[in-house]
């Protein structure tokens, strides 16, 4: 079984340029204060904007999971 770090690496390495561009655009749309980081509130609003219906504890769990891997994923898609 792959751990989260390896899973993100495999996913990022297999994304097309178009998919990477789409992720970057989505990030920019959610990062409303243009800080280069997404806050809990920005993520909550952004997820709703894209049709996700998560409660606050699920959003918090998502942020916790991503925060441990965000530097790896950013470096792979930058």
Image: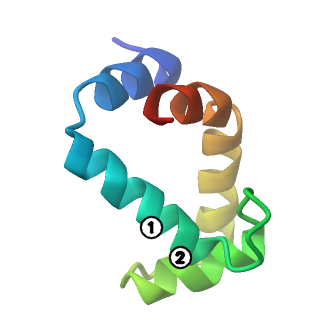
Kindly report the distance in space between the C-alpha atoms of the residues bearing marks 2 and 1: 5 Å
Position of residue 1 measured from the top left corner of the image (x, y, whole percent): 33, 11
36 displayed left or right of 26: right
Position of residue 44 measured from the top left corner of the image (x, y, whole percent): 63, 78
With respect to residue 15, does 53 lie above or below? below
Residue ID at (59%, 64%): 58
With respect to residue 49, does 68 lie above or below? above
Q: Residues within 10 Å of mark 1 (few under 14, many from 20)?
A: few
Position of residue 25 measured from the top left corner of the image (x, y, whole percent): 43, 65
Residue ID at (51%, 20%): 5
Q: Tell me the SS state at disc 2.
A: helix
- Nearer to the camera, 78 or 73: 78
Dividing the picture into quadrants, the one containing residue 43 is bottom right
Q: Tell me the SS state at disc 1.
A: helix
Say if mark 2 contacts mark 1, CB within 8 Å.
yes
Coloring scheme used: rainbow
Q: Disc number at residue 29?
A: 2
Residue ID at (24%, 36%): 15
11 displayed left or right of 23: left
75 displayed left or right of 49: right
Q: Disc number at residue 26?
A: 1
Position of residue 72 measured from the top left corner of the image (x, y, whole percent): 58, 25
- Nearer to the camera, 41 or 55: 41
- Nearer to the camera, 59 or 68: 68
Dividing the picture into quadrants, the one containing residue 37 is bottom right
Q: Disc number at residue 59?
A: none
Count of labels in the image: 2
With respect to residue 5, does 66 lie above or below? below
Q: Residues within 10 Å of mark 2 (few under 14, many from 20)?
A: some
């Amino acid at each position: 079984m792959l751990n989260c770090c390896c899973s993100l690496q495999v996913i990022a390495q297999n994304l097309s340029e178009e998919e990477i561009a789409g992720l970057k655009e989505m990030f920019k749309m959610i990062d409303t204060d243009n800080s280069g980081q997404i806050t809990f509130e920005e993520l909550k609003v952004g997820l709703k904007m894209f049709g996700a219906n998560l409660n606050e504890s699920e959003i918090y769990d998502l942020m916790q999971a991503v925060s441990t891997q965000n530097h790896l994923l950013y470096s792979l898609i930058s």
